[in-house]
Image (spheres, coloured by chain):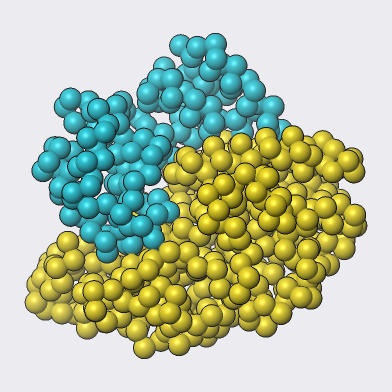
Chain colours: A yellow, B cyan
Amino acid sequence: METVLLKNIDNPKSADIDEYLKAGGYRGLSKAVTLEPADIIEEVSKSGLKGRGGAGFPTAMKWRFAATDPKFPKYLICNADEGEPGTFKDRPILEKNPHLLLEGMAISAIALGSEQGYIYLRGEYPDARDILEASIRQANDRGYLGDDILGKGLTFNIHVHQGAGAYICGEETALIESIEGKRGQPRSKPPFPVNQGAWEMPTIVNNVETLANIPYIIEIGGDAYSGIGSEDCPGPKLFCVSGSVNRPGVYELPMGTSLREIIHDHAGGIKNGRTLKAVIPGGLSTPVLPAESIDCRMDFISMQGVGSMLGSGAVIVMDDSICMVSVTYRAMKFFEHESCGKCVPCREGTDWLRKVLERVENGKGREGDVDLLLYISGTMTGRTFCPLGDGAAGVVQAMIKHFRTEFEEHISEKKCTYKSIN
Amino acid sequence: MLNETALQEIQELKIRYPERESALLPALYIAQREFGWLSNEALLHVANVLNLPEAKVRGTASFYSMFKDKPAGRNIVQLCTNISCMIAGSDGLVNFLQTRYGMKPDETTPDGRFSLILMECIGACGTAPAMLVNTDFHENLTEQNIGEILETYK
């Protein structure tokens, strides 16, 4: 397959605007400036593009809500707060293909009628900040951004806004709070950001990878794009594979590629001659799958069918030397640390779950702790303010569903039998 | 005191946003760069420059883990210990750093050379285990190479 998102990425100078132009860059924007905003949205609608941040919401539908809102100004925010553990797919775009993102943002801004954009970049990506700022200056100098884009009198400026180490700011309303200078706690919805987002104005928040798909859609047309990958979730998708595989890394493949193919063909199979035990398929917040469930298509709809989620496409592969209790405990330390504290079920639930998991992992588990974990997580599901708490509960529930005996053995044998993994 | 350059930077930040309060996170970064950490004095300066209540500034600063509420060492070692790095042996590296350099999580070594922070995911899962030292990424860490890397930070 021709790569779209990782195109030209092996070129050491790929981040430079001249290299980007040589590889066909800014053709989508050159076309977009001749189109009506509604026509751009129509192409994106025809493409079937679904948001790549994890939720899989149809991009064109989100855009239409904001574009048709009569309030101005409108803001376009790129969510580059890539923080879902296991996810490192946006980083190559940010660091090696930044103009693809800027071009995608400029086209999106024309479609929305936005003149001001922000890239909310996680604080842990200092290199990406420098590269993006240099790229924005280049694009301004060449007339692809700024106050007279390609001589058509269109205005769109972008600033990089650096986050400061809060996972929750990847949630779009928390991100907006953060960009407004506040604590990053999610807002109640409705109103939705498309109508009342940053500074109470219509705001689109799109993931890096989502925006990076836009130039190609405009260039080849929505109909042609919709022929790539799964019928109901088309397009190329970045899968980032980590853990117990021979070739971890970011792979651009058609949406709907099977999990088996990703692990065994692209990532080179399980390393050290071990066997596959479990996979977290879409970032740490997505429910674990046992080894026998990897014949599934990696797209938003198919993954729901096997009881998990595509999430960010972050595939964490675990071999048979790895203790599922220790993974669950480590995951819960993460959720507890990152819970923003706004709602009780998440704030208390993640703390209680972590405490129980800690004692089970350390051989101090009590009889009934497995059911206690299920009970606590059950009190969280559907009762938390944002998906963080739901995700935390779902992680525990899936781990116990597939690996219950492992939890019970920790309790009955009063120790972790997997201490080999450091 | 924030020097003239820093004050000028913050003034320029304000015009990037429709409301001055939005310049708070970047202003806190500048103050942290100048003071080394966000002391009461640093927070007060930021509050004054942005004309915001001090409590507001403190409330925001305390939410974010990258804003430091105590002095840090000359080099900040941010070692990822989330799942992908854990699978690749980050817990062993934490022990190694403690034994070899006396580094403890959330503490600074007595010589002021290193502060250790155990991180959630830093987006280097394909090259795990990984760490950021100050703003430099170091990936595919082992007990051998982590020592060599740290020797370059004095």
The spot of residue B81 in percent (x, y) is 29, 54
How many marks the image carries: the answer is 0
The residue positioned 53% from the left and 80% from the top of the image is: A257
Quadrant containing the N terminus of chain A in the rendered view: bottom right
Q: Nearer the viewer, residue A323 or B129?
A: B129
Relative height, residue B65 to residue B87 (above, below): above
Quadrant containing the C terminus of chain A in the rendered view: bottom left
The spot of residue A170 in percent (x, y) is 53, 53
The answer to whether any part of residue A384 appears in the image is no
| Quadrant of the rendered image containing residue A349 | bottom left
Relative height, residue B51 to residue A358 (above, below): above
Q: In the visual, does B21 lie left or right of A146?
A: left
Q: Nearer the viewer, residue A314 or A167?
A: A314
Q: Nearer the viewer, residue B48 or A105?
A: A105
The residue positioned 35% from the left and 83% from the top of the image is: A290
Q: In the visual, does A214 lie left or right of A247?
A: right
The spot of residue B143 in percent (x, y) is 18, 50
